[in-house]
Structure formats: C-alpha cells, structure tokens
Amino acid sequence: MGQVNVGLIGYKFMGKAHSNAYKSVGMFFPLKNRVVMKAICGRDETAVRKAAETWGWGSYETDWKKLIKRPDIDVIDVATPGNLHPDMSIAAARAGKHVICEKPLANSLAEARAMQKAVDKAGVKNMVFFNYRRVPAVSFARQMIREGKLGDIYHFRTAYLQDWIVDPEFPLVWRLDKKIAGSGALGDIGAHITDLALFLIGEISEVVADLKTFIKKRPLLESGSAFFARKKTGPPQYGTVTVDDAAAFLARFKNGALGTFEATRFATGRKNANQFEIYGSRGALRFDLESLNELHFYSKDEAAPEQGFKRILVTEASHPYISAWWPPGHIIGYEHTFTNALSDFFRSLETDQPVSPDFREGVRVQAVLDAVEKSAQRGKWVRVVP
Amino acid sequence: MGQVNVGLIGYKFMGKAHSNAYKSVGMFFPLKNRVVMKAICGRDETAVRKAAETWGWGSYETDWKKLIKRPDIDVIDVATPGNLHPDMSIAAARAGKHVICEKPLANSLAEARAMQKAVDKAGVKNMVFFNYRRVPAVSFARQMIREGKLGDIYHFRTAYLQDWIVDPEFPLVWRLDKKIAGSGALGDIGAHITDLALFLIGEISEVVADLKTFIKKRPLLESGSAFFARKKTGPPQYGTVTVDDAAAFLARFKNGALGTFEATRFATGRKNANQFEIYGSRGALRFDLESLNELHFYSKDEAAPEQGFKRILVTEASHPYISAWWPPGHIIGYEHTFTNALSDFFRSLETDQPVSPDFREGVRVQAVLDAVEKSAQRGKWVRVVP
Amino acid sequence: MGQVNVGLIGYKFMGKAHSNAYKSVGMFFPLKNRVVMKAICGRDETAVRKAAETWGWGSYETDWKKLIKRPDIDVIDVATPGNLHPDMSIAAARAGKHVICEKPLANSLAEARAMQKAVDKAGVKNMVFFNYRRVPAVSFARQMIREGKLGDIYHFRTAYLQDWIVDPEFPLVWRLDKKIAGSGALGDIGAHITDLALFLIGEISEVVADLKTFIKKRPLLESGSAFFARKKTGPPQYGTVTVDDAAAFLARFKNGALGTFEATRFATGRKNANQFEIYGSRGALRFDLESLNELHFYSKDEAAPEQGFKRILVTEASHPYISAWWPPGHIIGYEHTFTNALSDFFRSLETDQPVSPDFREGVRVQAVLDAVEKSAQRGKWVRVVP
Amino acid sequence: MGQVNVGLIGYKFMGKAHSNAYKSVGMFFPLKNRVVMKAICGRDETAVRKAAETWGWGSYETDWKKLIKRPDIDVIDVATPGNLHPDMSIAAARAGKHVICEKPLANSLAEARAMQKAVDKAGVKNMVFFNYRRVPAVSFARQMIREGKLGDIYHFRTAYLQDWIVDPEFPLVWRLDKKIAGSGALGDIGAHITDLALFLIGEISEVVADLKTFIKKRPLLESGSAFFARKKTGPPQYGTVTVDDAAAFLARFKNGALGTFEATRFATGRKNANQFEIYGSRGALRFDLESLNELHFYSKDEAAPEQGFKRILVTEASHPYISAWWPPGHIIGYEHTFTNALSDFFRSLETDQPVSPDFREGVRVQAVLDAVEKSAQRGKWVRVVP
C-alpha cells in the first residue's frame, strides 16, 4: 500500500471541512493508497499550529510558497478566499503538485482560464471543490436524468437561499468585500447552483440578470465584532458593501430548457437551502440541501391515478456513495460531501482516470457568472462565452 | 330583506365555479339581500338549458346582448374567454349593470383600459375575479404584511406550475389560441401570480422576461378530441400553437424588493401549484395553492433557537372568511375562494364601499403582462406603465 | 325526473353540514331524482326558522314526531346527539321512511342493535354518516388495498387527534356529558377511525384499551359561556366531566394485522388530524384528514433505488368522486365528504342497490367501542362481539 | 495534555460507528485529554486486523479477556450482541476499567441489574450507548420540556419503524435469534424509544402490550446468504424465528401522561423512523430520526391566529452540540450522535461529573421491556418494577 501526501492551505471553515474529509476518506472508502495529512498552512502561526494538532496534520507552515516547494507533498488543496486561488493554484501546478481548489475557481473568468492553462500545461490532476455534486441525492439525480427518466428537460428552477446577513448590523466581513471575494451571493452560492445546472442539465447559452445590494453600509469588522460578541463597544464605524446581496437570473440552456436562478443571503429563515426542481417530458425531480438525504421524483411512467412526487430517502446501498456509509435510513450530513468528493479524487489518482469537476469545468461555471455580471450592468441578455 | 339579481355569461368550467358560489354565498355569509340566480347565458341552447336546470338558474338566454338588456338583472358576470370580456363588460356597464369579470381583465392593455373607463363612466360596481386573493391564507398573508410582521420586503419569489399540456398530443384547445386567449400561461396563470404580487407586495416598476413555446404544433381539436376520448380516429391534423407554454420574468418592485416569476403548463407533476415565498427583514411567508389551507410563517421576533417555518392551518375563526365555514381543521377547497370573493362583492353593494380587485386593479395587472411581452420581444428590461 | 323529499332533524354543526350537502348533491352528481329539502326540525322555533331560511329548507318543524309523520317526507336524516338517535331512527323506520343517521349509530351496542333491527324489519334504506369513508383519498386507499397493492397487511396505525378542550376552562358542553354523548373522544372521533379500520382492513377480534380523563372538573356551560364570550361573569360553577378525554387501544385484526388506535381531544396543535398508516408486504399508505386531498403511497414493486413515499394528489378524474368536482389540483374540502356520501345514498335509492355503511356496519363499529370500554374497565384484552 | 486509552470489543456495524466517533471526538470537541484508539478486539483475526488498520486502532486482540487485562487500557467499549454484554461489562468493571456498553444493556432485567451492581461496586464510570438522546433535536426537546414550554404532558406517542425483514426470504440472522439478541424489535429498537420516553417524559408505571411475529420460518443464514448475494444456491433450509417482529404497548406514566409505543421491522417504506410526538398543556413537539436535524414545535403561547407546528432546523450554535460542528443549515447525520455521546463521556471523565445514561438508567429501560414481555404473555396490564 502506497501513500499520497496532502498539504492544505487554509484553516478556517473550509480548512476544517477539508481536514475532516482527509481524515475520514480512507476509513470509509477502499483506497489503494493511504491518504496522509502531511501539512497545513496559514499565516497565523498560533492558530495554524492548533489546527494541525486538533485536526491531525503532521506539520504546519506559515508560508504557502514554502509548502508548495516541499518535496514530500503530492497534492495541494487551496482552501482560501477566491483572490488567492490563482497564484496558489498556478504555483502548485508549476511545482508539479496535483491541485484541489475551493470554489469558485477564481474571482474572474480571466484568472480561471489562466489556472486551467497552468494545470493543463503541468499535466497534474485538478479538481474544483463543488462538493454538492457529491451529495448522493444529486449524483443520483444526474444518473436518473442520464437514463432518460425525465425525458426532455423543459424547466430547471433553482435557488440557493441563506439569511446570515439579513441583520443590517452584521459586519463587513471579507465575503462582503469585492477585492477578496470577487462577488457576493453570486460567486459564493450562485456558483454552486450554476455548477449543478451544468452538471444536471448541460450548457447555458445566454442569461439575463439582476444583482441587488439591499444593505449598502455595514459596521467595519473591528467595531462590528461587537455583533458576534453580543456587546456594544461604542458607535461602530461603517464601510461600504461592495458585492451583491442577491443575484437572480433567467437562463436559456443549449438543449432548449428554460432556467431560473436565484442566490441570496437575504432569505429570512432559509439557512442553507440549495434547491432545484427539474421538469421534463417524462418526469420531475426536486431537491433541497437542508434535507440532503431526500430526492423527490415524479414519474409519468406510472399508472395515472398513482402518480405523485415520491420522497426517495437516498440512503440505500444502491445509491451513489452510500455503500461506504451506513444502513438505510441512517442519514449522512453536510461534511460527507467532501469525503465523497475526495474519494473520487484519490481514486482518479490511482486509476489515472479523469476526475470531475476539474478546472475546465470550473471555467465554464465562471463564464456563466461573468455573463451574469455583464447582463446586470447592461440590462439585457448576454451570451455565455466559455 | 331585499334581493339582487344576477345574470351569468358562460356555462363551462368558470360557469360551474361561479354558479356554485352564487348558490352558496347566502348560506354561509350573512348578507342583507338575497342573491337570486336569475339567468345564465350561452350560445348552445341545449347545453345552457341543462346548466340552468342543474345549477339552479331561474332562466337562460342564448344571446348575451339580450341578457344585458333584461331589466330584472342587477349584476352581469362575464365568465367567458378573454376576447369576449371587453364587449360584454362595456355593454353591461353602459346598461347600468354592476359587472364582475373573469381574469385576466382583457387580452390587451388597451382593451382593459377601455373597460375601466366604461365602468367608471357608468358608475357601476366592478370586480375582476382574481379569486386567489380570497384564499383565507392569502388574505391572512396580506394582513400580516400590513401589520409589519415581515418588516421590509426583500424577495418575492413566485411560480404558478401546472402540467396539463405536457403531452405533445394534447390538442389545440382555445387556451392555446392567441386570438381567443390573448396569451398562454402568461395571461392564464401568470396573471394570477402578478395580481397576488400587487396585492401582497405593491407596484412593479420594471421587468425582464422570457416566453417559451416548447411544443409548437398540436393536433387540431376535432382530431385531437381522440386525446380525450382515448381512442384514435385516424392520423390527426396539426395546427400551430400561437401562445406561450411558459413565461418567466424578473421584476423590480417600487419598494425595492426583487421578484422572480414563473408561469408554466410544463411543470410535470404540478397540478395547480400557485406558490409564493416572501422574505423580509423580520420574517418570511410561504404558500402553495395545492395546500391552500396552510400558510408557512417564519418570524425573527421569536427566541433564536426556536425560530422555524411554522405551518399555520388557516382554519380558525380568527382567520379571514373562516368564521363563515367550518370548525378548526375542517379544511375548505378551491371553490370557496369564489364564494368568499362574492361575499365581498355583495357586501360592497350593500354598504356602497369599494370592492377589490376592481377593474382599475385589473388594468395594473394587465400593464405588467404587457411589459412582460414587450421585454420578451426586445430582450431587455421594460418599464411597467400602468 | 322524479323527486325525493328530505326531512332533517338538527340544525347546528351537523345540520349545516348536511344542509349544504343536500343543496349541492344534485348540482355536482348526475342523479335521476331531484333532491328536495322539504323540512328541517329543531326545538327552538326562532333558530330553526332562521336555519330553514338561510339554508333553503322549504318548511320547518319543532316536533320531530310530527316531522316523521309527514307524508311528504321520504327520507329522515337524524343529525342530533347520540342519545336521541335510537328513538328517532326507529320511529322513522316504523313510519316507512328511509333513515340516515349521524355517527356513532348509538350510545350503546344494545341501542345500535335495536336500530338495526328496526330498519331491517321496515325494509327501508339506511346509512350511518361515517363521511370520512367518502374522502376520495380514503376511498382510493380502499380500492388499492382491494387490488392487492399493499399485499398482506401487517400494521394499521391510526390516531384521531384534536385539541379543542385542552384549556381547563373550556366549559362542560354536551359532548362532555355521558348521558347525552355516551362517551367522549372514543365515540366522537374514535368511532370514525374504528369505522375506517373496518372499511380498510376488516374485522377486529379483540382489543386492549385505556381511557383517560385529564381534566375532571370544568365550568358549567352557563358560567363557562364566559369562555366563548371571552369575558368573566363571576367565579364559574364547576361540574364533573363524565366522559373520556382520550382513548387508546391495541387491536388484533382477524387477518392477523396489528392495530394501534388513539383518539384524543388533548393533542395540542392538532385540529382535525384523522390519520392512518397501513403497512403491508407489498406497500404502504399514509393519510391525514388535515391534508385530505393527499394520499401517500409506498410500493415495493418499484425499482429498489426509486422507492419512496409518494404524495398522490387525489384530485384526478380517475380518482373516486372527483369527476363530479374540479380539475386536477383544485382541491376539495371537508364538506364535500357529505355530498359524496349523499350521492351514494341517493343513487342507492334509484338503483335499489345496497349503500354502505348501513346500520349493520354501524353496529359493528359499536361492538368495537363496547369492547374498548369493557377492556378499559377490566384491564385486559376483550373479544369484540359484533 | 493527558490521554485516555480505549479498547473496543466488536468490529461490525457498531464497531464502525464507535470507531468513527473515537476518531472524530477530539477533532470537534475541546477535550482536555487526547482520546487514543488503543486496541480493537474480535474473534476473527483477519477481519479484526483489517478493521484496526482501516479505522486507525493501534493494535488488536482476538480474546476479549486479554484485552480487558491490558494495563494500557482505560476504557472498555462493549459493542457486541446483547448476550455478551454482562460477562464483558462485569469483567471490565472488575478490572477497574470504565465501561461503555451498547444498548440494550442486557437481554434480561436480572443481567442488567448484575451489571449495574458490578460498575457501582467497582466505582468506574459507565454509560449505555443510547445514542439517540444525543441527537441535538432530542436534547433540545428535553431542554424545552424542562423549561416548561410544553406545560403538563398529556400524550407521548412514539414509534420506531423499520422494514428490513419484510421480505419472508430474508434469512435468520442473529438479531432474529432469542438466545443471542434476547428479543426482536422490542429490545433492538423498542429499547431506544423506551429510553427516550424516560429521558423526555419520566418514569413509566405500567404497560399493556402485544408482541407479534408475522413470519415464523426463515431461511437459515448459510442458505439464506443467497439473499444477500442475490443468487440461489439450492432450496434453502428454514429455521424458526424466536423473537418478535413487532411490539406495541400502551403505557401509563407516573406524571399522568398516556403513552403509545410501537416498534416494528415490518413497516414497509420506513427505514429508520424513530418518531415521537409529545402533547402538553402549553405546546407540542414532534420528531423523526429520518430527518434528525428537524424538531417540530407548537406553542400555545403565541398569538392564536399564528399558532402552528414550526420546523426548527436544529443546526444553530445555540442548539445542543452544534457549536462543535458546522454553520446553520449544514446538517449532521446519524454518526454524529455517537460522537456527541462520547464527548459527554470523556468530559465526565475529565470533570468527574456523572454521565447519562448510565447503567442505572439502562436498568430502568430493561424493567420496562421486562414488563412488556410479561404483559404480552399474560394479556393484561403489568406494573414496571425498576
């Protein structure tokens, strides 16, 4: 049994999620090589050392360039904000490392293309962490569509609804800063539903969009940290929100389907509602990430009086990824999607088969987001140029 | 106790629904005047005579102009396809009758305006039969919004989903003929959700839209009637569908809310899913006509760990219209919305108070539909001119 | 076209529900004879006269014996509390009238048997108003079970959950008085689920039960009427509740199925939740009266990864009773179950076919309730003797 | 930082679930001592060696007595079938090890009592692995009940519904053998809902029960293994099922609440539906393990027209255990309940506070199961003697 050594850049929310996945992937999936958590990297030494200890990384670095140069690392995982993705991913590729990158691939289409070019040139494996493709119910949805169970697709209706910044006093965190995050709801969660659209339905030809910032001034993080601490430390300083709070767009798919998309952080009461509905000539599907073990399926092939939306509990051994986990009805959670994705990635290393979604697919998502932004500026339909 | 005499034009689906409402309104609601079902009108004498007998109309007419002239009629109810609304409504108003008209008010904005002008000039009561405003849950939703329970409104997401023409062999009925119906899903069911948008959220400033016809040729009704009869009578003749199968649009509301609308007859598995979601700074609401006795409400005013979407069964005496009906948990159905609407109408006659929605409000819906059609042609945002 | 003349005894909740059904049955169902609302009967003349006017009865009586003697009445409908059922029904039968009786048939098994004997001897049509059999979803459930779609039945789990007397200050109304109502939750709503058990699954052999009265003293109605008026008129007088607040029992069906039953008026938040779940070797069904247009069906005959509980919206023309009503997705409500039941009854008059459930079936329900009461007293299993 | 060394007996379903929990507990919860996976034990050396490697145990044993004697082990976790619990747990306690034992504590009340006596005498920490108490929604339910949000409890309705042996050709596995498993659905899943009843509502005074075996003969495992392999290897040999397929009972709680319980492996379509409903004077709760991140709450304290069952997504940092995991709406799964339970256990070691449920509580569950079995034999109510 060989081994594959991983270096992770980032130690916050995504750092934790990825760490857990590296730790568990070999326990649940039958891999040939042992996955070794070699090093984690972050700028704050105290914090990154603690992360290394708690999560089980063998060492840590505070300089990502040093990490990338380390000869004992086979795979670099970029789990940082979007503005850092290009430099890190391109350098890792040039250093001959396989690269896994958080989504969205980049903050601009041009950067995303440069990243793709770099990994292609270096001939290294590459994957974008669109983990929601790896929800068993979503993978199963794709399988059913491929098998023709929905027939011709007429409608793809999707929304990613959250509410974590509805409070106007929620501070100006990095995700609300265009320079770091690139965009707001669009690139953060709109990217996820765009990726699922391409995964499930196919290419998008053109879009017409609206972007909206409901709250334009927010407390700066220093003063705003009172929000998290639930105490007031004097009148807060306000700064300008430079990204969208919500994005909505209509889309025309190449196959003739009509798409409606909405991504927002202002859907009061929705915590992580990544939802889609697909209507086809033979049937329909419905999904919501808040109930991620369920897929709802309607089939016109059944006897007419018995047709209805069926709640399939996607926890059977016959469903994608589930045989690795638990018996029927013993549901899995959010974090398992990362483990499932990594099992695909490491298997692709072992078999030298392609892994999906790779950077090329990441670029296609970026092209849609790019067209959305252009349409919102121009007030009309814009073609997607991938 | 006085009485008010009604004459109804139309004896098919809407004729039946309206007849039932006239029959039951006085039984359930405490009106001062008795509602008398005086005459029903339709061109096919055999059919209209049978309708009169079955549904309890005192007489029948085969010429609507004759009905309108009858001195024993106080109220004319126009329950015909849209192309007939203007002539009938205007003539009724000129004859001094109060006018109730099925939705959408007309097939074009210009006609709708002319109708409004006619009723205003005649000084007669007028109502458009947007019956879904009179679903108790919808009326209650409006009441809650008015009371500020949702705070500032950020998002209005709505869809009216049906599937009755998904089968490509479904014939070319009048609702698929632009000359009679004016438009397809847009005017038929899109009008309903547009009316609810205006009712619940307020005016729409501009829209950007897409209209789609998935199946462009369908069997002519004569040959297509085989579809209904479930037998084949030779190869069918095909004609062209001249209306939209689906309509989708984004909307900007005057109050800053962002709207997404979709109306379709191609949502396989959805029978009558008139749905909305409203997200505001203090709370959220969700509704689906297929479960019309339920309203889902989320309130940020509750203790944080106890917040959640609450299924309110809108069957309490404290809910709109319900005290007329049954005890808690004894649900009502589709037809009750017509009875509720008529109770409002007849009370407005008794009290000489305004009734809503009147033709003026019907025009405002029409103005949105008009902008949607223009946007679909022009490929860009179009201002709504009411 | 002939006609059939009805006389109704009772003008409160059930009087209203039955009146509406007589009024609408001929409008929606194709009957050969016209149903004529001839007379309504109640002791309070002012009230019964008003009921007659509002609901459309041609005349009224204040003495039920007089009503029963009237030669212009063909059918007597007994919609009074249970203690009055035997005398009225037996007298009506002896007078040669067809008899419809509210449920439960009687307050005791002996009385129920006497009633059955009377109608049998008189040779008149008879029906017990177990209206929930006539919910389309329930009728459809029975049809599916008959067709073998569930295979052998293993489990029948049912509960009828209400909450209208949870407040300890809710007054001592007649339904809480054993002399009038016979029993509490057991005979009122427990009777309904017992009838559905016999209708759907078959005979019950034995039961073991518990009856519970949570609140033993309540304000007398005179003083307690302050509860309804929401004001206090001095300290209330209290009386003793003489019936059960809740009934629970286990049952063994003749076919080997295991049953669990619960009927309660103390299920806070449940308004009219008449629910069942049926599990068989080939499939399962689930129903809740608060969503009465839905039936949930699970079939093991489907491909394994696609199995799931399916929400069938029972509003298709192919479903029982629905062709009389509205198009798919246009839901019906509580009151329609009475109209459906009457359509069966009047058709049985026209065709001289049996109607179900008749008094004989009412007796079988009563035999189960009787065994439940005996078991609750004796603390052990009791055989059902029908 | 100190460390605590664990030895696990058992390497199948529960072995995997427990191993994962030991592996992750220190990553997610802030423990003072490092949890070290010292040794795993099983009789089949090849299998246990592989389990040790895959799951990360430092060593393995094939003789549980040897494991218990190892001085480098602090905690023994007994994850074997019920018939082995007493010997292993008692020996571990005598050897001075802390003991964690899978549920139910034992196959008989007498054995359970002996186990409690042993741990008490040895003065070691002890816990029964009733992991479903540690579902955040369940812990939160208990918290709400304790805070009086439900008022007086009237009803506890619970069922644990599975369907994995509905097929009559499913073989005679150890869980269907009384000698090994003690009982069927009763001890396996009925134990879980009994424990939750005691946890949420309090002590049970008496019960009346029915036990049912629907399929009495099944293929022996050797021949029946064809079932799993999906091929036939000649006509199977049949053996007798010696446990219950389903258990149902009524219960009287000490606090006056009425309980209904059902545990079955014959609820076609239900995979892991551990459900409860609680109705009290001020509110109600509802839960289903198949959607374990949700708790439904009804409060009579809210304004009357706004009351309804609220779906609380129990994924907020303010909910029990959640701050260890992910942001709101990022759901957790089945396995997390074990990790949560272990975090309680290891914290109790660090603080020397009691942990719950301990063996004493395990005995109380056993006393209820014992009374259920006696009642099923005797056909009448039986008092619970804890």
Image (spheres, coloured by chain):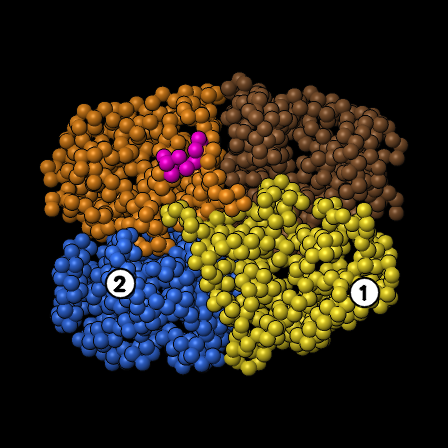
Chain colours: A orange, B brown, C yellow, D blue
| Residue B373 versus residue D246 in the image, above or below | above
| Residue A264 in view, yes or no | no
Q: Judging from the image, what secondary structure is the residue with disc 1 in?
A: loop
Residue in view at x 74 percent, y 56 percent: C349
| Residue B365 in view, yes or no | yes
**Spatial distance from mark 1 to mark 2, Cα to Cα?**
67 Å
Q: On what subunit does the disc labeled 1 rest?
A: C
Residues A323 and B144: in front is A323
In magenta, the rendered stretch is A144-153
Q: Judging from the image, what secondary structure is the residue with disc 2 in?
A: helix
| Residue A231 versus residue D130 in the image, above or below | above
Q: Amino acid at mark 1?
A: Gly
| Residue B178 versus residue A168 in the image, above or below | above
Judge left or right: residue A338 versus residue B99. Answer: left
Residue beneath disc 2: D221
**Mark on residue C96?**
1
Judge left or right: residue D99 versus residue A4. Answer: right
Q: Amino acid at mark 2?
A: Leu
Q: Position of residue D191 (x, y in %)?
A: 37, 69
Residue in view at x 68 percent, y 63 percent: C358
Q: Position of residue A6 (x, y in %)?
A: 18, 41
Judge left or right: residue D154 versus residue D53. Answer: right
